[in-house]
Image: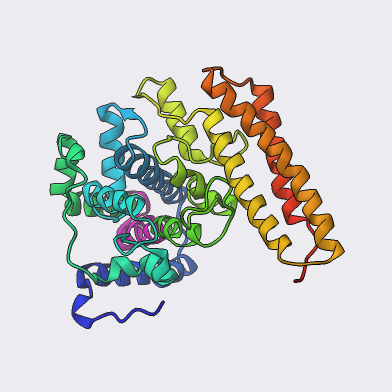
């Protein structure tokens, strides 16, 4: 879809800032690193800021404030509000308002970063341009009740620059000395880190709606990608997240790479967060089974349209797998109706046989009408 963007709709504040910070991070920082050695203090500070600002977005802005996936005591809220601001992705009120609107109107015009408008728009275009009138922030009334959230919204710019750029520059000055140390703080710990954290966030809105699998639902474009999870602190399991947005986990399987989930669990053990919201395992398995059934029935409809021996063999195989899946679904529905929790062994079997169905569909020989 081609967009005609009126010149007067350019958001000059966002565009100017992103142009400057990107140029500093992508061009100036590498040149600086080529010419000067940065000491271990600054590299440690870079690593610290990469982790805490990234997690403050995924754990704080996203799962805590936008989705209310758990409750947090004031030290956690304050920490994520300060370092979330250091990512220069706006205050949490604006961030959460946009994100809640994204979930409510995914893939529709009202979606702020609607992927149907193109990869560029979903990735960063929606930040650079405002094609419509500003949306009322009437979906974050709950967050306005938090005094810390109100404070961050009021002083967001000051917090972002002081904690995100000026403090690293001061550390550079005292650890390395002179202008070289100041530039190390601004260019490396500041600009380079901001670019990397922002791009990882933007990838959730763009790539995670383009690449990956849809094991839980095809109702929207969101997809699961373990590759994206590696660079987005576990946010890459986006199909699951859109189906079960209030779960504090994105990578729900034990082997999923989800540092944000692990951080929340660690904070829970320390007594700093509580009321972790999680979807029952049986409901997750049911979603996988229903989606697998939908895909199998769609494949059967496709096979019925052709008439050859290959299609007949494939139809028999799909019917065999589908019959087993429906048997498992009936068993699941019966246990739910009787308020009986399925055992871990049963859930494991259902998952395994569901995966066999999906794998069987992908392994069917190519057919022609």
Above or below residue 54? Residue 78 is: above
Residue at image x 59%, y 53%?
213
Q: Seen in the image, is 364 located left or right of residue 167?
A: right
Stretch in magenta: 173-195
Q: Is residue 99 visible?
A: yes
Residue at image x 67%, y 24%?
346
| Front in this rendered view, residue 46 or 304 | 304
Predominant SS along the magenta part: helix
Q: Seen in the image, is 181 located left or right of residue 315?
A: left
Q: Is residue 173 visible?
A: no
Quadrant in which the C terminus appears: bottom right
Q: Position of residue 253 (x, y in %)?
A: 59, 36
Labels in figure, total:
0
Q: Seen in the image, is 216 located left or right of residue 150?
A: right
Above or below residue 20? Residue 95 is: above
The image quarter in which residue 3 lies: bottom left
């Amino acid at each position: 879809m081609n967009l005609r963007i009126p010149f007067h709709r350019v958001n000059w504040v966002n565009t100017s800032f992103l142009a400057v910070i990107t140029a500093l991070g992508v061009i100036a920082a590498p040149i600086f690193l080529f010419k000067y050695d940065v000491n271990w203090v600054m590299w440690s500070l870079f690593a610290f800021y990469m982790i805490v600002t990234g997690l403050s977005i995924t754990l704080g802005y996203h799962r805590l404030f936008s989705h209310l996936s758990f409750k947090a005591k004031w030290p956690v809220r304050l920490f994520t509000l300060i370092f979330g601001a250091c990512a220069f992705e706006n205050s949490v009120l604006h961030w959460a308002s946009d994100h809640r609107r994204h979930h409510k109107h995914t893939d529709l015009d009202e979606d702020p970063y609607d992927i149907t408008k193109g990869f560029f728009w979903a990735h960063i275009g929606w930040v650079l341009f405002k094609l419509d009138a500003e949306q009322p922030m009437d979906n974050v009334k709950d967050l306005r009740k938090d005094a810390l959230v109100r404070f961050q919204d009021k002083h967001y710019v000051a917090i972002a620059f002081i904690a995100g750029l000026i403090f690293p520059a001061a550390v550079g000055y005292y650890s390395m000395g002179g202008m070289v140390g100041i530039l190390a703080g601004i260019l490396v710990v500041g600009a380079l880190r901001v670019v990397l954290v922002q791009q990882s966030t933007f990838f959730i809105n763009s790539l995670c709606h383009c690449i990956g699998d849809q094991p839980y639902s095809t109702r929207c474009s969101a997809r699961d990608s373990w590759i994206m999870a590696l660079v987005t602190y576990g946010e890459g399991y986006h199909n699951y997240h859109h189906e079960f947005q209030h779960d504090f986990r994105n990578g729900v399987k034990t082997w999923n790479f989800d540092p944000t989930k692990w951080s929340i669990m660690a904070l829970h053990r320390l007594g700093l967060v509580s009321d972790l919201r999680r979807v029952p395992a049986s409901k997750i398995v049911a979603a996988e089974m229903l989606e697998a059934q939908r895909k199998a029935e769609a494949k059967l409809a496709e096979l019925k349209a052709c008439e050859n021996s290959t299609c007949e063999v494939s139809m028999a195989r799909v019917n065999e797998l589908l019959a087993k899946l429906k048997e498992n679904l009936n068993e699941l529905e019966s246990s739910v109706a009787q308020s009986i929790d399925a055992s871990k062994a049963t859930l494991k079997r259902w998952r395994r046989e569901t995966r066999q169905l999906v794998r069987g569909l992908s392994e069917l020989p190519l057919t022609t009408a």
